[in-house]
Image: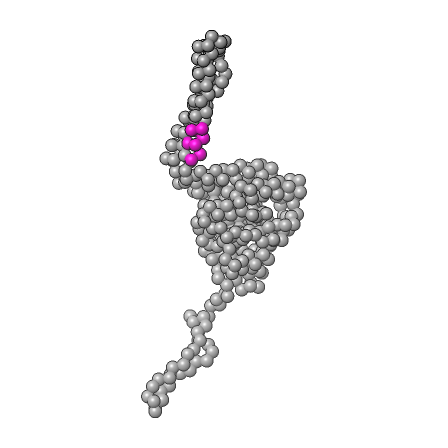
Amino acid sequence: MPTTTGEEKTLSKSPDTKCLIITSYKVKSSTSIPAKALFSIVISLFNEEESLPELISWIEKVTAEQNYKYEIILVDDGSSDKSWKIIKDLSKVNPAIKGISFRRNYGKSAALYHGFKAAEGRVVITMDADLQDSPDEIPELYRMITEEGYDIVSGWKKQRFDNKLTKNIPSKLYNWTARKVTGIKLHDMNCGLKAYRNEVVKNIEVYGEMHRYIPYLAKNAGFGRITEKPVHHQKRKYGVSKFGIERFVNGLLDLISLWFLSTFGKKPMHFFGFTGILMFLAGAFLTLWVIIEKLINQANGLDFRYVTDQPLFYLALIAIILGSQLFLSGFICEMISRNSSERNQYNIREEF
């Protein structure tokens, strides 16, 4: 219940003026209201039982110093260790902690999708649970979103402590390719430490392995104020890295897929139809060329080859057939919705 504090004057009635003199008073709630608006920290994790208590303690220290009102959403992506038990124990001590547990490992995109869905904060911050992302960066990320008006602030690990051959070099190649394809000038697009306006995460759909390209998804959704901030990177303290060469290859393939969908997703006929018409016309031209050449040589008494004896004729037929199939594929793709109703249906074991 609110309590009154400060100067409080009573109602008094002047006998001469016969009027009421009403003075103001201050109302202070008995519940402390933080100076900052609420924000959400979304953390996806897989087998991080050792790092979780230390990470949560670190976040609580930072938020207490800044007097933030916050929530932590921990998404357990099918861990086989005691991660979920630790999350439940931590939530009993800190009611700001919420948890979501998958029955099996669906991947980081699935975890972020449900984390974003549950986030209520004005600002949404994502980070990894392996202690390589520093919670000390949270205040500045929050400030850049709320005060400078950015839609997304992405972390940039300028100094990395990963293996140069297996992770740093592939990461630089990947980010160079991503900058060229997406047009977004970020040095570390796949950095797990990012801050978003709530409106951004509520208007994008993260699925498959597209968590690597959330800035690109946001750009395609109309959120173009994207910047980066150099952040501190730490060596992994517990466990082993889950990064492998297959993730690098899959990342490039996902980038191509995302570019294709964002460019031709709504109008696939623009790609399939145009390509099909070109192939069909090329095949028809070559077929006519072979036939006319044979007829001219035959009419002039020159040596000639039968049309069916020429390899170019069969290549032309293949081009005509493929062109027709591509053109028809464009029609089919136009009729099929690219938004599957089951794309973001995940079997959640427990949620609180």
Q: Is residue 271 magenta?
A: yes
Q: In x, y percent, where is residue 96? A: 50, 58
Rendered view: 56 above or below 243? below
Image: magenta residue range = 270-278
Give the residue furthest to the bottom.
16
Question: 64 and 13: which one is in front?
Answer: 13
Q: Is residue 248 left or right of residue 351?
A: right
Which residue occupies 53% across, 36% down? 253
Q: Of helix, strand and loop, which mostly describes the magenta segment? A: helix
Which residue occupies 44% across, 49% down? 203
Rendered view: 296 above or below 173? above
Which residue occupies 34% across, 86% down? 19
Question: 337 and 64: which one is in front?
Answer: 337
Residue 102 shows in the view = no
Question: 228 and 74: which one is in front?
Answer: 228
Residue 170's image quarter? top right
Give the residue furthest to the top.
301
Which residue occupies 54% across, 47% down? 184
Q: Is residue 145 left or right of residue 232?
A: left
Rendered view: 181 above or below 153? above
Q: Quadrant of the N terminus?
A: bottom left
Q: Is residue 340 left or right of residue 234?
A: left
Colour mapping used in the image: one colour
Q: In x, y percent, where is residue 320? A: 43, 23
Residue 206 shows in the view = yes
Q: In x, y percent, where is residue 209? A: 51, 41
Q: Is residue 280 magenta?
A: no
Q: How many marks?
A: 0
Q: In x, y percent, where is residue 249? A: 57, 36
